[in-house]
Image (cartoon, grey):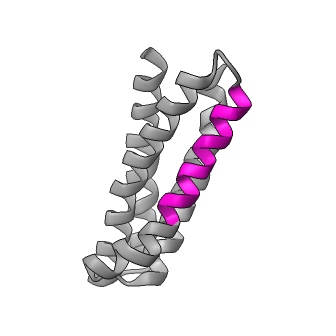
Amino acid sequence: MKRLGKFAVVLLVLVPGAAWLITLAAPGAEVARAVWTSAAVAVVVQLVGFAFTRTLQPANVMVGWGAGVLLRFVALVIYGFVGVRLLGLAITPALLSLAGFFFVTTLVEPVLLK
């Protein structure tokens, strides 16, 4: 539970920071809405993925990590085909930012899994 809390803190620093930088580089209300929505989705999916990985870690860390990666991929696909359309978001900034958030935060994950 302690590692999940640390990961949550890292997520709540990295993801909003990255979202803020993206909105500085690509201004516009439509882009900002897409990026911040993707940031929220990334935090939720990453927390679920990390918790799932931690649960499976004692049995087989690679299976847990692989399941977490699969969860992120499925979330990205569903977000792209369903979520973006339902929410009326600009597809390019929404998907690129979500993929970027997943990538950056996944790099931090192994440090907290040790």
Q: Is residue 92 above or below residue 62?
A: below
Q: Is residue 14 above or below residue 6?
A: below
Quadrant where the C terminus sits is top right
30 or 70: nearer the viewer:
70
Residue 21 x, y percent position in the rendering: 45, 64
Residue name at image x 60 percent, y 35 percent:
109
Residue name at image x 58 percent, y 59 percent:
73
In the shown orientation, is residue 109 left or right of residue 20?
A: right
Q: How many marks?
A: 0
Q: Is residue 17 magenta?
A: no
89 or 66: nearer the viewer:
66
Q: Is residue 43 above or below residue 76?
A: above
In the shown orientation, is residue 29 left or right of residue 62?
A: left
Residue 23 x, y percent position in the rendering: 39, 71
User: Which secondary structure class fits the magenta region best?
Assistant: helix
In the shown orientation, is residue 51 left or right of residue 35?
A: right
Residue name at image x 42 percent, y 16 percent:
1
Residue range (magenta): 61-76
Residue 45 x, y percent position in the rendering: 43, 48
Residue 5 x, y percent position in the rendering: 40, 24
Q: Which quadrant holds residue 30?
A: bottom left
Residue name at image x 44 percent, y 77 percent:
81
Q: Is residue 62 magenta?
A: yes
